[in-house]
Amino acid sequence: MCDTRMTLFKTISAVLLVGAYVYFAATQYWILSTRSPVRIELHGNGIEIPSFGLGTWLSDEDKVAHAVEFALESGYNHVDAALIYKNEKETGKGILAANLPRDKLWVTSKLWNADHRPKEATIAVQKSAKDLGVHYLDLYLMHWPVAFVPGKDTKIDESTTIVDTWRVMEDIARSNLTRKIGISNFSKRDVEMILEICQICPYAHEFETHPYLQQQEFVDWHKEIGIKVIAYSPLANTNPVYKDKQKLDPILKDPLWIDLAKKKNGTVAQTILAWGLQRNTVVIPKSVQEKHILENLGALDIKFTEEEMLEISMHDKKTRMNDPGRGWGVKLFADLDDPTQLDGDEDEL
Ligand SMILES: NC(=O)c1ccc[n+]([C@@H]2O[C@H](COP(=O)([O-])OP(=O)(O)OC[C@H]3O[C@@H](n4cnc5c(N)ncnc54)[C@H](OP(=O)(O)O)[C@@H]3O)[C@@H](O)[C@H]2O)c1
Ligand SMILES: *[C@@H]1O[C@H](CO)[C@@H](O)[C@H](O)[C@H]1NC(C)=O
Ligand SMILES: *[C@@H]1O[C@H](CO)[C@@H](O)[C@H](O)[C@H]1NC(C)=O
Ligand SMILES: CC(=O)N[C@H]1CO[C@H](CO)[C@@H](O)[C@@H]1O
């Protein structure tokens, strides 16, 4: 009697155990087989981007070498470069002269739109690294989610998608020419498309954001998906090329920022950059003047209260300064604040 009960108990236990095992194995298989993408961890993943860097767009060829050297000797450890800025050789001279240990320096460069095809991309990244005088870059960005036909000025390359280009970026990362890869000037939909297919996923997204184009939701979303935000044009309309593009007065003359700067015992530029840092974006102000290069570093000492952060958030002007999409006939930033308006199709937006 006791024996048969025992056998029955053992049999039931065994069946349950096998069942549980089969169920576990099946769900694991299902999870693994449906989980895509497979994310590959690259070497050097522990090193993070410094939160403060020197921009080099429109930095005079004659001045940028000195500016970079001076910055790196004054405490900067991060330089934001790009092939299209046409000054990487001079930037490289500054990097060489400062002679920081390679692991104490962060160098970013960017793949230009005309170089998205594999052959051109390989040449472009090698040229950037060589001109900047480094064996490897720390970060290589796809400069825009737009491909041009190589050698045809700004003619759109309809046969190269951003997914194609991302595969090329992944190969560049695998070749060890850069430690990390990322994107720039992407809309939310573009980012999602890359996240769906990436094997090596974007480390950072560099886009325009400053007190006049805060995009707080977009910035927060990047935190959720684990992509660092690099804020370009952190001084809003201070870059003189933006002068004609919008009717806003210079942010350096904005009474809100003048008041905040007084309160913080800093300059207006320092105070604006400090806000960028406090919202966890990496800021990369450009300057070729020693005075400004030093001044801007002072942002690291300024902190805001929550009330002040809230007040600043209420002064967003949602105004984009940098939008070449119109000239290219491409609608950029479609799902973000202040998207490209192409002639005659405003009603679609
Ligand atoms: N990924 C992209 O598509 C993209 C797009 C735009 C920019 N970026 C990167 O982001 C960097 C920064 O953006 P940005 O150059 O457009 O604009 P920015 O850094 O916001 O502003 C630069 C301008 O501000 C002036 N300036 C700097 N510090 C100042 C200070 N303390 N007081 C007064 N004026 C000051 C500079 O002049 P001086 O040189 O005379 O000091 C320059 O005219 C670029 O250089 C580039 O590396 C990337
Ligand atoms: C890249 O670096 C890693 C780690 O050092 C190494 O295992 C790999 O073989 C390198 N790949 C190439 C293509 O050099
Ligand atoms: C304000 O800043 C100036 C210049 O940086 C400095 O000399 C001074 O000590 C500061 N004052 C206060 C109250 O922090
Ligand atoms: C300033 C920057 O790096 N952004 C790029 C975005 O695209 C514009 C238009 O070509 C470039 O001029 C900028 O360099």
Image (cartoon, rainbow, N blue to C red):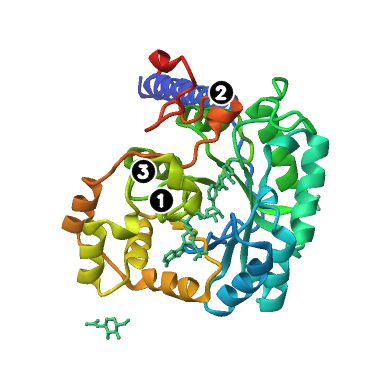
> Mark 1 or 3, which is nearer the eye?
1
Distance CA(mark 1)–CA(mark 3) = 10 Å
Q: Name the residue under label 3.
A: 213
Amino acid type for the residue under numbered disc 1: Asn
Residue 347, image quadrant:
top left
Tell me the quadrant of the picture where the N terminus can be found: top left
> Mark 3 or 2, which is nearer the eye?
3
Distance CA(mark 1)–CA(mark 2) = 46 Å
Question: Taking 61 as reference, is 186 above or below it?
Answer: above
Q: Mark 1 points at which residue?
A: 237
Secondary element at image label 3: loop
> Mark 1 or 2, which is nearer the eye?
1
Residue 47 placement (x, y as % from top left) = 57, 61
Residue 336, image quadrant:
top left
Distance CA(mark 3)–CA(mark 2) = 38 Å
Residue 253 placement (x, y as % from top left) = 30, 59
Q: Can I make out residue 104 in this image? A: no
Question: Taking 285 as reference, is 98 above or below it?
Answer: below
In this view of the protein, which residue sits in the foreground, 316 or 196? Answer: 316
Q: Which residue is drawn at 63% across and 29% down?
A: 162
Q: Is the residue marked by circle 2 packed among few (<14), some (14-19), or many (20+) residues within 10 Å?
A: few
